[in-house]
Amino acid sequence: MSSNALAGAAVADITPPVGARMGGYGKRTSGSVGIMDPLFVRALVLSDGRSSVALAVCDLLGVGSEVVSVSRRLIEETLGLPADAVLVGATHTHAGPSGFRSAEDPEYTNVVARQVAGAVAMAHRSLEPVTLKLGAVEVATVSQNRRDPGGPVQSTAQVLLCDRSQPAPPVATLVSYACHATVLEHDNLEYSPDFPGAMARSVESLLGGTAIYLQGACGDVNPVWSRHDRAEVERVGGVLAGAVGRLAQEMRPLDTGQWCINLSWSEDIEVPCPGQLIAPLSLAAARTELELPRRPRRSRREVEGDLREMEATLETTTDVRQRRELSARINELATSRLFPPVPTDRQTQRLEVQALRLSDQCAVVSLPGEFFAETGAELVDRCGLPALLVAGYANGSVGYVPPARAFPEGGYEVGMTQFGPEAEAAIVDAAISTVRSLYR
């Protein structure tokens, strides 16, 4: 099958100066003291000869709206790519700087935006013919739902291989998976992309080319670890990379076919490959903006009163189920007391969802914050496509957006969210509509 696909990939360093405040954990008491591994933006540009789309993923906790808007403006000025066609996301590492919004560090966020635009420009300049191959591989041992051990996770990694003709290495390997990048804990004060960076390095060593980790809906999914150090980062990333590398190698003959000699029959028997070809490439892009009401916040005094009552009840009960229910509510209240009542001039929050059509069978959809694994699964189920890649932490950073059913349960994520129970459904509906608009 002939392919009309062109692809280019590039990497740019976005490691901030040592000493900057780090994000992801409130317990840290100082800024960074070193660099365990550099932080990068990894960019992929796809073209069908008429249209192009770009994905750029940063080793950051998130990407603020200013990083997204400035990088898109620079990309449009340089390459002519419209904002609809540019997705800027984050791996959600908790070992990066806290200043990913311009209000916190305007100088650094301007550097990141320029590096994003530069990486996309380099990727665009390196466009070359490829065959796109998509597959999924089980990864069952490195993640768990952090609210309920039996709760949903993304149990397979999706792999989009931008392949050259063998024996040349692929141009890029895009890995879509959902798991918090939190192998390293709050006591780590060195910059690191955590396991997504280790995965990328390992895949690049196995296959060549550029590897890109596209973080999914992992708001309630954490990594499974045995320690909080660099060796464990490499191990967890290596488990994912091993599964990805195997699948990618198995998919490489998809366009040429593979055979085995049958000596009894004197025949060459064709052996099927896993995965599917994404051809022809047929690119399109769309964005939808929403303005959602912010969740009303009670006063700190009211919250602390409820918190004291629940903590007192917790001390007197021995029932395991009741203790867990109380603990979840206590975690919600302890978190929510950090947020003051919403100012009258900030009653709503603007956000966007984006869809990138790759072919009749495959698309990418973005979510601008931390969504639960079940939300990602719902998007995949409802979109009506054989393959949908979900990009969380993309095109903005609005924090947690739990599904409505999580609010009565409480917990950290419910305490953190700035939205009410209705927000998740509204965003999912908008995302599905945006994807479907590209297939009419």
Image (cartoon, rainbow, N blue to C red):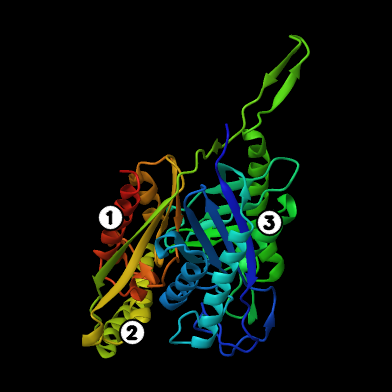
Residue corresponding to mark 3:
238
Residue furthest out toward the right: 263
Q: Residues within 10 Å of mark 3 (few under 14, many from 20)?
A: many
Question: For the residue carrying disc 1, how many other residues have a C-alpha within 10 Å: few (<14), some (14-19), or many (20+)?
Answer: few
Residue 258: name its quadrant.
Answer: top right
Q: Position of residue 267 (x, y in %)?
A: 73, 13
| Residue 24 placement, left or right of 377 | right
Q: Are marks 1 and 2 in contact (CB under 8 Å)?
A: no
Left or right, residue 143 beside residue 326: right
Depth check: give the residue in front, 4 or 167: 4
Earlier-in-chain disc, 1 versus 2: 2
Above or below 35: residue 174: above
Tag 1 residue? 429
| Type of amino acid at the residue the image marks with label 3 | Gly
Report how far apart the C-alphas of labels 1 and 2 lie in the structure. 28 Å
Distance CA(mark 2)–CA(mark 3)? 38 Å
Per the model, the C-alpha gap separating discs 1 and 3 is 36 Å
Would you call the spot at circle 2 few (<14 residues within 10 Å), some (14-19), or many (20 or more)? some
From the image, tell me which residue sits under label 2.
Answer: 339
Q: Residue at x 48, y 66 (%)?
A: 88
Query: Height in image: 62 above or below 42?
Result: below
Indicate the secondary structure of the residue bearing disc 2: loop
Task: Measuring from the top left, give residue 334's x and y in whole percent.
Answer: 37, 81
**Could one spot residue 275 in this view of the protein?**
yes
Q: Tags 1 and 3 in contact by the CB under 8 Å rule? A: no
Label 1 or label 2, whichever lies nearer to me, is 1
Q: Secondary structure at mark 3?
A: helix
Amino acid residing under circle 2: Phe
Tell me if residue 187 comes above or below residue 179 in the rendering.
below
Q: Position of residue 103 (x, y in %)?
A: 43, 87
At x 66%, y 51%, the residue is: 171
Q: First in sequence, mark 1 or 3: give its number.
A: 3
